[in-house]
Amino acid sequence: MRLRAYTYSQRLTERLEFILTQLLHQYSQPHLYDCLHSCMVETITNAMRANLKFLYLNERRINLQDEDAYLRGLSDFKQEKRIKEWQDIYKQKIRENRLYVEVNIDHSIDGMRIETINNLPLLPIDEKRIRSKFAHAMQVDSLADFYETHQDDTEGEGLGFVLSVMYLRSLQLDPALFRIGVIQEKTVARLEIPFTAHFRSVRNSNTPA
C-alpha cells in the first residue's frame, strides 16, 4: 500500500485510519491501532514540517551547515508558521516544489512495516538531535524522567519520536525497530511490528535507516 501527499488533509486522515483499521483487523491485531496510528501521524507530520522548514530556510539562503544561522532561521520559522496566511502560501509552494511525503505499508501474517518518506535528506543538525533523543528515550522509564534529564527545546525535533518509543515500550514492542535515517537522499522513518516469530526485520541489512 502506498500513499503520497504534500500536506495533511481530512482525506489523507480518513484514508490512513481506514487502511490501518482494515489491516490490523485482517491480522487480528486491532489492539495495536492507537499506538501505530499515533506513530504514523507523528512521522507524517514531522516529514511535512521538515519539507516546509527546508523550503523556508532555503528561500532565505540560510547556510544549513552553519548551526548559529540555522538556529536563527529556525526561530523565525517557528514564529511565521503560526500565521494562517503564511501556511496557505507555503502549502502552495510545497506543491510547486514537489516536496512530497509518501507512506508505504508492507504487511503479511508475520508482521507489518510502515515507512514514511520525504524526498529531502535529513539535515545533519536535526539527525544529531533526533538520534540523541532516541537514545535517551531508551534509557528512561517515563516522559517526566526524559524532560528532567534531557534539555533541548530546538523546535521539538525528535520529541514526537520519543513519545512513540515510549508508547511502543508500553505495549512490549521493541522500540529498536523504529528507526530514522537517509536513503538515496530521502529521509525515511521506518516502524516494524512483528506479529509472529517468523518476522524478518531489515534492521540488520545494509539499509542505513
Image: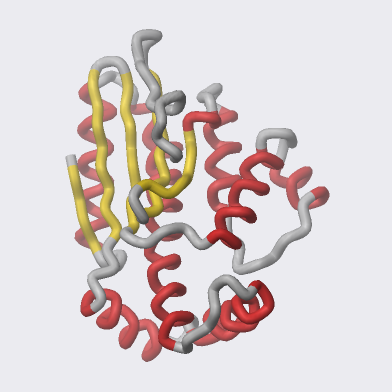
Q: Residue at x 64, y 76 (%)?
A: 71
Q: Quadrant of the C terminus?
A: top left
| Left or right of 198, for residue 157 | right
Q: Residue at x 75, y 52 (%)?
A: 147
Front residue of 90/26: it is 90
Here the colouring is secondary structure
Residue 93 spot, x, y in % from top left? 28, 82
Q: Quadrant of the N terminus?
A: top left
Does residue 149 appear in this view? yes
Q: Residue at x 29, y 58 (%)?
A: 101
Front residue of 86/63: it is 63
Residue 112 spot, x, y in % from top left? 31, 27
| Left or right of 112, for residue 34 | right
Q: Is residue 41 above or below residue 72?
A: above
Residue 205 spot, x, y in % from top left? 40, 26
Residue 176 spot, x, y in % from top left? 54, 30
Q: Residue at x 61, y 47 (%)?
A: 131
